[in-house]
Image (cartoon, helix red, strand yellow):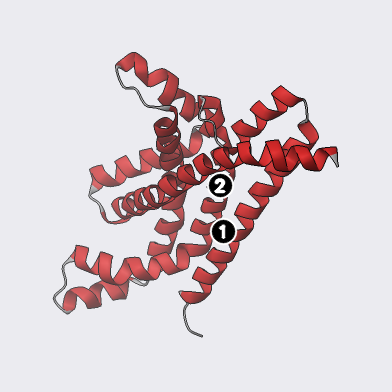
Amino acid sequence: MDSLLFIYQELLPELGKGLIVTLKLILFSIPFGLLTGILVAIGRVYGNHFLSSLSKLYVIFFKGCPLLLLLFIIYFGLPSLGITFSPFGASVLGFVLCNGAYTSEYIRGAIQSVKTGQMIAAQALGMTKWQAVFYIILPQAFRRALPGVGNEIIYLIKYSSLAYMLTCIELTGAGKIIAARTFRFTETFTVVGIIYLLMVFVATKILQWAEKKFSYPT
């Protein structure tokens, strides 16, 4: 009974504030991460030598750099160069850069899986190269890349907990503060884990619906 009172009267209200920050982190990071991934993938496949090489270097660096280290560089390192971000802004930027690198690989593979004859046919109909990419190739590629992109979205939901390391008090951060103050570690982190599980469950269902909605007819 004491644990239930603690959860409903003290824990959930405080975690609710952290959950709002977590949802903001996710909602800002997902679309910009996806856009970054699309642009990097297109640049790598269809760009000139310089743009293709630059896109490849971007992927190599941000896939190879641990996310936590990347967040530290943005938040603690860049101020020495006169570039400062708020904890929330630094977290979103780090998530977008990391998510964009991984997403671009799924989209690049999907783009390359589309038969080259479709590009030739589109240009034969009078489309420019970039019109063919955006109106013919990319819609098909995104359908094929959706399962992989969905996995990155799920990972992003869980990785959002790293924002606490930059003093951005999201769900995990709020849980750590409450646990340190009350010494109710078991109840606190169990509830935090359940909330993350619910978010992942909802996101998975939405992604499954999207995959079914945009799947190729058989």
Residue 164 in sight from this viewpoint: yes
Using a 10 Å C-alpha cutoff, classify the residue at mark 1 as few (fewer than 14 neighbours), some (14 to 19) or many (20 or more).
Answer: some
Label 2 vs 1, first from the N-terminus: 2
Q: Amino acid at mark 1?
A: Ala
Label 2, label 1: how many angstroms apart (C-alpha)? Answer: 9 Å
Query: From the viewer's perspective, is 34 left or right of 197?
Result: left
User: Residue 75 versus residue 51: which sits nearer the camera?
Assistant: 75
146 to the left or right of 155: left
- Name the foreground residue: 204 vs 17: 17
Tell me if residue 26 comes above or below residue 180 in the rendering.
below
Q: Secondary structure at mark 2?
A: helix
Question: x, y (%) of residue 187?
Answer: 78, 38
Q: Which residue is mark 2?
A: 157
Residue 66 shows in this picture: no
**Where residue 53 sits: x, y (%)?**
31, 42
Q: Please name the residue shown 50% across and 30% down the image.
A: 168
Q: Is residue 211 above or below residue 77?
A: below
Q: Residue sitting at 53 percent across and 75 percent down?
A: 212
Name the residue nearer the viewer: 175 or 99: 175
Q: Looking at the image, is 8 positioned above or below residue 39?
A: above
